[in-house]
Image: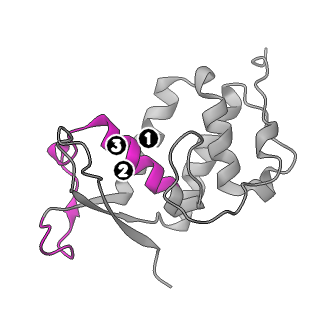
Amino acid sequence: MARRETRVTIPSTDPNNRDGGKVFLIREMPATQAEDWAMRALLALTAAGAEIPDDLEGAGMAGLAVMGVQALTGLKHADVKPLMDEMFTCVQACPDRQNPNVVRPLVEDDIEEVQTRLFLRREILQLHVGFSLPGAPSMSTSETPGPSGAGRITRTSPAR
């Protein structure tokens, strides 16, 4: 079975958004890469003092995403940057709006707005785990609640 993928169009409601109307293809990471990414994310979160919930296995990668949001203040940029960079290995540009089947790797000038990067990160998470970051408007029409126990994550003191 092929990896999941989705094409997303950046909303063009703001006339000052230089990325409005641009199309990107997001393709799911291979299982080995996704597992490695999740493990590195989990290790960074625990090093930052995030408490792992008892039912993390049941919460899956969505649980990791919740932990990440709640532990942001303790995470170090050096630990998070490689994870954030790797997220964009899933994204390709669709430079010809008339022919969306033409795709190519991203180049620096493909994305001109920070809000576009945040939008694409949300879409990457949604594709991989069916989960949107808290506070971000959901594009989903599903009313399925999040993982049980995901709201019980608390910050702890760093290990000594």
Name which residue lies at 79% across and 14% down: 160
Q: Say whether residue 44 is visible.
A: no
Q: Earlier in the sequence, mark 1 or mark 3?
A: 1
Q: What percent of the width, then of the height, locates residue 74?
A: 62, 21
Q: What percent of the width, then of the height, locates residue 129?
A: 59, 60
Disc 1 residue crowd, few under 14, some 14–19, many 20+, Cα 10 Å: some
Label pair 2/1, CB-CB below 8 angstroms: yes
Q: Which residues are magenta?
A: 96-125
- State whether residue 81 is above or below residue 136: above
Residue receiving disc 2: 88
Q: Helix, strand or loop at disc 1? A: helix
Is residue 106 magenta-colored? yes
Residue receiving disc 3: 117
Marks 2/3: CA distance?
9 Å
- State whether residue 149 is above or below residue 1: above
Mark seen at residue 65: none
Query: Closer to the camera: disc 2 or disc 3?
Result: 3
Q: Helix, strand or loop at disc 2? A: helix
Q: What percent of the width, then of the height, locates residue 109?
A: 15, 43
Task: Say which amino acid is labelled 3.
Answer: Arg
Task: Say which amino acid is labelled 2.
Answer: Phe
Residue receiving disc 1: 84
Q: Given the current orientation, which residue lies at the most extreme bottom position? A: 1
Disc 2 residue crowd, few under 14, some 14–19, many 20+, Cα 10 Å: some
Q: Given the current orientation, which residue lies at the most extreme right position? A: 54
